[in-house]
Image (cartoon, grey):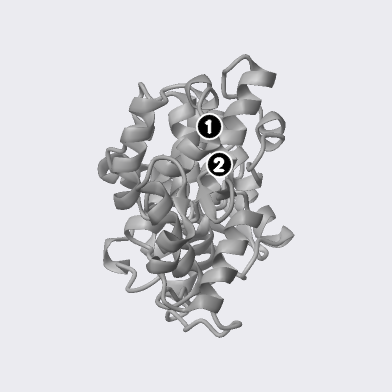
């Protein structure tokens, strides 16, 4: 089926068919994409993949699905066990949110991950992207799915800029909707295909334009690949940050069953003011609970 994209007053050849052909030949074999993958496997992967590369997610996802193959299995355990199993993936609040979503799925949906966008969006910790992604990738529905990879591909191919705006705006969402195939199964495949293209070819740094199936259709390429001139892009710092300190404290608690004394936490980070600030933030986020005087544990 031939497609055309109307953009900025002209009709351009569609990106859809070449991207689908490329995906068919180049897609990675990931467990949450296989025909036998459950909707729960897809949902777990989406929580884990937020700000975390696939290579780090794969072993944790496998262990998680072996231990908790259904939402009910996870919901029956404490949220602290979810945090412990999250390991070193980072951003452990995601583990609490996923546990909360599992509890809600059991309570409100008979233990089955819902297929409808609105029902998914109502789950704890599920925002627009995750709701659209689970509905699309688990159930083959037609939704605009905008992660960082998709946004970058569409910004370059359709808008001719190296990077999209810091946050999604209405114009960007409308542009993504304009190239979404009408046919529901095709739309679902397109959504994962353009995401894969951004992950493997149209990368943030050193994009492999020579390997791109839509190079001749790309507005950024046609414009001479102009450098990004928007607001400075955030750089993720790690060493010496509160995030690193929080991670050290969490590692102590994950590696011990039951409560640990404050002295164990003090030994994990030298700088006392930052350490106390990090511990206070973990308590506020309910990733850590205080049990008795100067003893702490996972929730």
Pointer 1 residue:
78
Looking at this view, name the residue that lies furthest to the top: 110
Q: Nearer the viewer, residue 37 or 8?
A: 37
> Would residue 137 be seen by someone viewing this image from the given angle?
yes
Please identify the quarter of the rendering in which residue 251 is found: bottom left
Residue in the picture at 50% in, 35% down: 43
The x and y percentages for residue 9 are: 67, 64
The answer to whether residue 275 is above or below residue 27 is below
Q: In the structure shown, which secondary structural element does the residue marked by tag 1 occupy?
A: loop
Of labels 1 and 2, earlier in sequence is 1
Q: Nearer the viewer, residue 35 or 255?
A: 255
The x and y percentages for residue 87 are: 38, 48
Rendered-image quadrant of the C terminus: top right
> Would residue 191 be seen by someone viewing this image from the given angle?
no
Residue in the picture at 34% in, 41% down: 60
> Viewed as shown, does residue 112 lie left or right of 270?
right
Q: What is the C-alpha distance between the residues marked 1 and 2?
A: 7 Å
Residue in the picture at 44% in, 62% down: 263
The x and y percentages for residue 234 are: 53, 76
The answer to whether residue 214 is above or below residue 97 is below
Mark 2: few, some, or many residues within 10 Å (few <14, many ≥20)? some
Q: Which mark is residue 289?
A: none
Please identify the quarter of the rendering in which residue 202 is found: bottom left
> Viewed as shown, does residue 254 lie left or right of 170?
left
Q: In the structure shown, which secondary structural element does the residue marked by tag 2 occupy?
A: loop
Residues marked 1 and 2 touching at CB (< 8 Å): yes
The x and y percentages for residue 20 are: 39, 43
Mark 1: few, some, or many residues within 10 Å (few <14, many ≥20)? few
Looking at this view, name the residue that lies furthest to the front: 293
Pointer 2 residue:
299
């Amino acid at each position: 089926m031939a497609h055309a994209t109307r953009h900025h007053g002209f009709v351009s050849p569609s990106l859809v068919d070449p991207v689908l052909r490329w995906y068919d030949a180049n897609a990675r074999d990931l467990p949450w994409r296989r025909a036998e993958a459950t909707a729960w496997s897809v949902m777990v992967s989406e929580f884990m993949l937020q700000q975390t590369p696939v290579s780090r997610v794969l072993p944790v996802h496998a262990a998680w699905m072996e231990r908790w193959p259904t939402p009910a299995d996870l919901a029956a355990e404490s949220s602290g066990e979810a945090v412990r199993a999250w390991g070193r993936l980072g951003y452990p609040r995601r583990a609490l949110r996923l546990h909360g979503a599992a509890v809600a799925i059991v309570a409100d949906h008979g233990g089955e991950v819902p297929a409808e966008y609105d029902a998914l969006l109502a789950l704890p910790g599920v925002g627009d992207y995750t709701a659209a992604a689970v509905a699309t990738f688990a159930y083959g529905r037609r939704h605009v799915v905008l992660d960082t990879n998709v946004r970058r591909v569409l910004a370059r191919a359709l808008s001719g800029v190296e990077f999209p705006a810091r946050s999604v705006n209405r114009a960007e969402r409308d542009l993504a909707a304009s190239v979404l195939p009408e046919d529901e199964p095709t739309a679902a495949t397109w959504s994962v295909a353009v995401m894969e293209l951004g992950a493997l070819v149209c990368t943030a740094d050193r994009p492999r334009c020579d390997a791109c199936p839509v190079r001749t259709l790309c507005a950024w390429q046609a414009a001479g690949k102009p450098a990004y001139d928007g607001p400075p892009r955030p750089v993720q710092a790690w060493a010496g940050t509160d995030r690193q300190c929080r991670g050290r404290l969490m590692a102590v608690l994950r590696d011990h069953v039951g409560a640990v004394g404050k002295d164990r936490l003090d030994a994990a980070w030298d700088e006392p003011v930052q350490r106390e600030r990090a511990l206070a933030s973990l308590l506020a986020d309910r990733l850590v609970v205080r049990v008795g005087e100067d003893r702490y544990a996972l929730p």
